[in-house]
Image: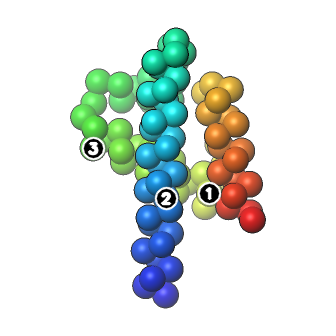
Amino acid sequence: MGKMIVLILVIRHIIGTAYYLLAIWEMKYGVEETWIHASGIDEKEYNIKYLESFYWALSTVLVNGSKGDTPAETVFTLIILFMAIC
């Protein structure tokens, strides 16, 4: 049971980090409004950004999903939900 919880947390860490990197990638290529801007944490420290992305990863898979703020975020969310089902 403990190993499963650790595995779930590690997977959520990877998903949350990928979600954060997606927003960084979008900003680099010209998308002005990402989830970082929408949640108002663009000027916050990295630990706050990490906690927000980790929370997104937990809530998206465990609750009911979410809609991304950009088309790339929506596709990313759908992929993560599909992976959670499989």
For this view, does 82 lie left or right of residue 31? right
Residue 47: mark in rendering:
3
**What residue is drawn where x is 69% and y is 53%?**
81
Q: Residue at x 74, y 54 (%)?
A: 82
**Residue 16 shows in the view:** yes
Q: Position of residue 48 (x, y in %)?
A: 30, 41
Q: Which residue is mark 1?
A: 61
Residue 65 against residue 37 in the figure, above or below: below
Say what amino acid the circle numbered 1 marks.
Val
Amino acid found under the numbered disc labelled 2: Arg
- Asked whether residue 68 appears in the rendered view, the answer is no
The image shows residue 16 at horizontal and vertical percentages of 47, 48
Q: CA distance from mark 3 to mark 2?
A: 15 Å
**In the rendered image, which residue does mark 2 sit on?**
12
Position in image of residue 65 (x %, y %)? 66, 49
As helix, strand or loop, the secondary structure at mark 1 comes to: helix
Which residue appears farthest toward the bottom when viewing the image? 1
- Type of amino acid at the residue the image marks with label 3: Asn
